[in-house]
Amino acid sequence: MKTHPPAIATWLLEHLIRRSQREALIGDLFEEFIRRGSPHWYWGQMLKAIAIDFAHRARTEWFAVVFAGVWITMLAQVWPHIMMTLGSQPLIWLGIGWPWPLSLLCYVAIFTAATTVSLWIGLVLYFVLTRRFECRSLLRGMAVTSVLDLAINTGGLFFVGRHRVGIYMISWLPLFVALLVSMIAGRAVGSRGANKSTA
Amino acid sequence: MLAVIRLHESAYGVPIVKEIEEHTGREASIGSVYATLERLEQKCFISSSVGESTPERGGRAKRYFRVTKAGLREVSKTRQALTKMWEGLPILERRPA
């Protein structure tokens, strides 16, 4: 029987759950894991806890939801111009001109870099507007954005396939979710003193 | 809230989940229980305090929950309302189709 829960799952809990619940919740999961000894159960509980926590925060932090929606809508409008500007760079065509699959990887890398930077700008603007501009919050938000954006683009590449990448790229919903999660994850670091007992 | 009342002084995450599972026969995740407890705490129906940290919890502290007077009043009101709603109803049994 395993005596330690999966470290990655615990790390995610430590970084994505609000401070007010983090300590007790992870302790409870640890205690129950020792009894059950099932990493599968632990991962399932971790995913549920993070999803519930984010759903709660999305309900209470309506400004983040509205801001992410507005930012992604604006981004979708200016995106053709950004891609045209990028397309006029000879260095990019050099990469895309490589044989498959290098050309595809290069295309996805360029797309991922462009979307990530666009989401980062949105993230910075959000922290400025909410007056929560802390270095730690911003860095965490940016890190979460990068990981999610890479996962979204790699997932899109995997599921949609080589010839239908164009269809995937007009889907902005995953990027909306990525931006919202990044903003909330960043704010989780910034919100201090939330773990005080009420007793 | 009933699970917290039943557990008295030892009401923290793990026993609360077990209590709910035993009495309802349904699986409850620790995350959803904490979300519910947080809502109840915001409504001042329960209060919480941080307890001791033990090695079997990876050195992390427990969070104990207790029902407040307002919470007990609310539970009592809900019970009365449910009792009234059930009054006069026949025993509901699933009949074969």
Image: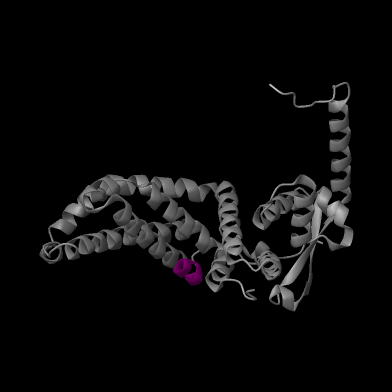
Q: Which residue is found at the position 41% from the left and 50% from the top? A: A176
Q: Which residue is found at the position 59% from the left and 55% from the top? A: A48
Above or below, A17 against B94 in this view is below
Quarter of the image for the N terminus of chain A: give it: bottom right
Q: Name the image quarter holding residue B96.
A: top right
Q: Which residue is found at the position 65% from the left and 69% from the top? A: A37
How many discs mark residues in the rendered view? 0
Of residue A35 and residue A174, the one placed in the foreground of this image is: A35
Is A170 placed left or right of A20 in the picture?
left
Dominant SS type (magenta): helix
How is the rendered protein coloured? one colour
Q: Residue furthest front?
A: B96
Q: Which residue is found at the position 43% from the left and 67% from the top? A: A143
Is A115 placed left or right of A91 in the picture?
right
Residue A36's spot in the image, x, y percent? 68, 66
Quarter of the image for the C terminus of chain A: give it: bottom right
Asked if residue A186 is among those painted magenta in the image, a careful observer would answer no
Residue A91's spot in the image, x, y percent? 13, 67
Of residue B83 and residue B96, the one placed in the foreground of this image is: B96
Is A101 placed left or right of B26 in the picture?
left
Residue B7's spot in the image, x, y percent? 86, 57
Q: Name the image quarter holding residue B12.
A: bottom right
Q: Which residues are magenta?
A: A134-140
Residue A35's spot in the image, x, y percent? 71, 68
